[in-house]
Amino acid sequence: MTHQHDTAHQAFDAFVRRERDGLFRAAYLLTGDRHHAEDLVQTALARMVRRWGTVDEPAAYVRRVLYTQFVSWWRRRRSRGVETLVADVPESHAPPPAEPELAMVLAAALDRLTPRQRAVLVLRFYEDRTESDTAVLLGCRVGTVKSQTRHALQRLRQVAPELADFATRRVEVAP
């Protein structure tokens, strides 16, 4: 029994090492705040560890928890106006954004979207998920994903027209 526990613990540790940076980047895009992103990832992984060994696709499960938890947190914070603070924040090893100016503009623009719109855009365009995958992760219909994507992109064009400037830049790749 101890050997099985050790093996499961090692497998979960390897999973966390493999997934944490991607989870953090997605959480940061959702929350727009490093500390909230770290809390969100920590919550998602805490839920995952309780289900470890019983979930067929752990990466998909933890991402679904991440996105649904984000929407739930936003609703609770908005209705209560209360934030939960934690004593220790884990270190993150996520690399800095390639273009800091773009990162700031994008973060400010995403902050002006609804949580569901942010989640849809992050899943569809940052994580390059299909509409079907996005619907499964968010627990909604494909039609909802399509309409949320359309509304979110329309809103981004309104609140941050300067993002179009970044889309037309030619990216130089070093040899």
Image (cartoon, rainbow, N blue to C red):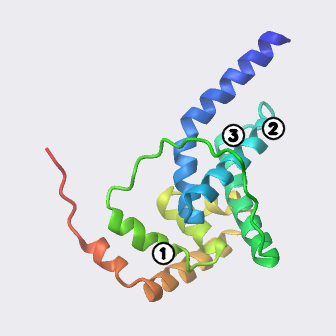
Q: Which residue of the protein is positioned furthest toward the right in this rendering?
A: 1
Question: Of 17 and 63, which appears nearest the observer?
Answer: 17
Instruction: Determine contact: label 2, label 1, CB under 8 Å.
Output: no
Q: Which mark is residue 108?
A: 1
First along the sequence among labels 3 and 1: 3
CA–CA distance in space, label 2 to label 3: 11 Å
Given this view, does label 2 or label 1 mark the residue nearer the observer?
1
Quarter location, residue 130: bottom right
Secondary structure category for the residue under label 2: helix
Q: Residue, x 76% and y 42% (percent of image)?
A: 46
Q: Is residue 8 above or below residue 58?
A: above
Q: Amino acid at mark 3?
A: Glu
Question: Of 100 and 63, which appears nearest the observer?
Answer: 100
First along the sequence among labels 2 and 3: 2
Q: Which residue of the protein is positioned furthest toward the front in this rendering?
A: 87
Q: Residue, x 67% and y 44% (percent of image)?
A: 88
Locate residue 117 relative to residue 108 in the image: left or right. right
The answer to whether residue 53 of the structure is visible from this angle is yes
Instruction: Determine contact: label 3, label 1, CB under 8 Å.
Output: no
Secondary structure category for the residue under label 3: loop
Q: Amino acid at mark 1?
A: Ala
CA–CA distance in space, label 2 to label 1: 35 Å
The answer to whether residue 140 of the structure is visible from this angle is no
Q: How many marks?
A: 3
Locate residue 136 relative to residue 168 in the image: left or right. right
Q: Residue, x 70% and y 58% (percent of image)?
A: 136
In the picture, the quarter occupied by the N terminus is top right
For disc 1, the neighbor class at 10 Å (few under 14, some 14 to 19, many from 20) is some
Q: Which mark is residue 57?
A: 3
